[in-house]
Amino acid sequence: MPTRYEVTATALNLRASPSAAGDILTVLRRGQQCVGAGDAQDGWLPVSYQQLSGYLSANYVRVAPGAAAPSPAPVPAPTGGVPLPADPQTRLSDQSQLHPQFRQALGVLLDKLAAENRPFKVFEAFRTPERQRWLYEQGRSRPGGIVTNAKPWESFHQYGLAVDLVLFVNGQWTWSSTGDLGAHWKRLPDLAKEAGLRTLTWEAPHVELPVALRDAAGPALLASADAGWADTLASAAARWRAAGGSGAPDLAPAQRPTTA
Ligand SMILES: [Zn+2]
């Protein structure tokens, strides 16, 4: 029977290698549990947490009270979709994960931008709830400036109904609005509106489908969905729920379309 461990620090990095320089796979909170995968060496304990395998600093974990390791909850893999990354720092920009209704309007917007030689590209599209949490933590429980006020499942990115469009100039992303670039940012909300999309005054790159958040996985959008969107959303919700998270939409299998 593998040993179950519990995190004793406020936040503890799960690292890809047994070193403080190892890549951070995710961050565990106080009281969260993981399963031991061997003995600690040089202060680093190999563990598995959800679908991740990595190392925790052994100073900040203890054997969980009454520990008997549960078998990991099954998580459906996306069928034919793009797999969801485990690393919350991974940014997705694949349009196949977006709702077809939003994707179509986005295509109209991108055509309009191209017709006016405005060099916007999709910087980020679907965003996992784990990444939303990680971004929300920035400027709060992690150093850095605040980048979002939306918690997991409060952003349209979690429903494949939003993208962030950023200028791509000379092979580089730029958020600059100095010089000629300012006119591009100024024009974006107008063209988005013409394409039937909504922008936010406080987040210039963000473009979303103009629906209410409570309808983001509602009957109307489910009825016009495709498998790429539905599988992405269902597997993100299942993974979130399997880790004990709340707020994920419930997509009953019968509601899901079976063909792309
Ligand atoms: Zn956004």
Image (cartoon, rainbow, N blue to C red):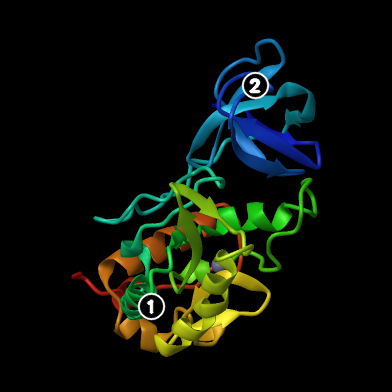
Q: Position of residue 116 (x, y in %)?
A: 38, 75
Q: Estimate the spatial distance between the alpha carbons at disc 2 and disc 1, rounded to whole Å.
A: 49 Å
Work out whether residue 20 can be spotted.
yes
Find the residue positioned furthest to the front: 179
Left or right: 249 as drawn, with respect to 255 = right
Q: Residue 228 occupies which quadrant of the picture?
A: bottom left
In the foreground, 238 or 217: 217
Residue at image coords 50%, 46%: 90
Residue at image coords 61%, 36%: 34
For mark 1, give the secondary structure: helix
Q: Which residue is mark 1?
A: 109
For mark 2, give the secondary structure: strand
Which image quadrant shows ligand 1? bottom right
Q: Which numbered disc, 2 or 1, marks the residue that appears first in the sequence?
A: 2
In this rendering, the answer to whether 134 lies above or below 2 is: below
- The three-letter amino acid code for the residue at tag 2 is Leu
Q: Which residue is mark 2?
A: 45
Report the number of numbered marks.
2
Query: Which of labels 2 and 1 is toward the front?
Result: 1
Q: Position of residue 165 (x, y in %)?
A: 48, 65
Work out whether residue 155 can be spotted.
no
